Amino acid sequence: MTQEQSKSRWTVVTPRLAGHMALWLGIAACAALLVRDGVGISFILSVAGIVTGAASLISSRRSGAKVRLRVIGMLISAVPLGVIVALIIMRPPERGHRHVYCQINLKNIGGALREYERMREGMPGKIDDLIGSGLLPPGAFSCPFDSDWRNGQSSYFFFLSDKNNPDSLIGCDLKTHSGGRNVLTAPHNVFFLKHEEFNQRLAQPENAAFAAALRAFEASGAKHFPLDRPLAASRPCGDTAPMADRTSDKE
């Protein structure tokens, strides 16, 4: 066989072979996605299929069925790769960083409270007033990991006691994250406190009313804070006594 015949044979066989390889590598990559812990294998097969098809197209640009076969193989190989990238982008955050999402929500709520106070020259009577004023959407009060949340509810607890004290709390997570809770202070600052730090903060005199209201609310078994509940009298459902009376009775 002469060198020309060998070269001619190589250019005829290689595109067809590369097309079949890319096609089957793509199919294998798709199948690997369906297998448990097969994402890594699927990624390797998908990249191999795309590289095989692309390299063949670069080395031989002949038109016809062989080109279509290689392109189809590359497209099929690209499908699982796209799925893997989407899973990486859309995957839920690590458990240890979930509190950051609620921290962002509380920061937005604090900013809306500040803007409401500036516009109306006073704090709202209900958190629902922030939605009515167009400062926040209802979803701003939902923890991203709270599957039971509904409109009209809040994943965060609020109680306005002494808004003039920079150390007093006016809001916090109802659900613990990473061994602690996010808190919202009267100056609308937000930060994360571990359980011990949170309890120490509640024990401070300026947070006595907030702590009493929070403990009473939690004791009621309620999982969500009603957005239409008066902020200065947050109390368990069915309890008609003002929170101020409840606190004074305990003292």
Image (cartoon, rainbow, N blue to C red):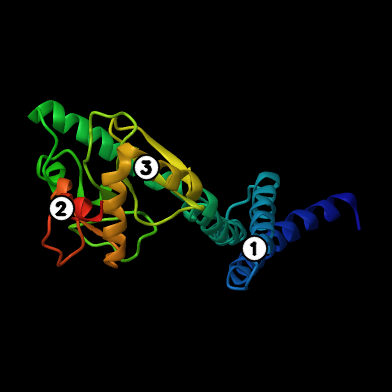
Q: Nearer the viewer, mark 3 or mark 2?
A: 2
Mark 1 or 2, closer to the camera: 2
Residue 152 horizontal/vertical position (percent):
17, 57
Kind of element beneath mark 3: strand
Mark 1: few/some/many CA within 10 Å (<14, 14-19, 20+): many
Assess disc 2: are there few (<14), some (14-19) or many (≥20) residues with their C-alpha within 10 Å of its C-alpha. few
Kindly report the distance in space between the C-alpha atoms of the residues bearing marks 3 and 2. Answer: 25 Å
Mark with earlier residue (3, 2): 3
Residue that extends furthest to the right in the rendered view of this protein: 1
- Give the image location of residue 76, x and y in percent: 56, 62
**Relative depth, front residue between 7 and 240:** 240
The amino acid on which the numbered mark 2 sits, given as a three-letter code, is Asp
In this rendering, the label closer to the viewer, 1 or 3: 3
- The answer to whether marks 3 and 2 mark residues whose Cβ atoms lie closer than 8 Å is no
Find disc 3 in the rendering and name its residue. 183
Residue 188 image offset from top left, x and y in percent: 30, 32
Mark 1 or mark 2, which has the lower sequence index?
1
**Left-right relation of 157 to 239:** right
Q: Position of residue 181 (x, y in %)?
A: 42, 48
Q: Which residue is mark 2?
A: 245
Q: Vertically, is 109 above or below 39? A: above
In the picture, which quadrant includes the N terminus? bottom right
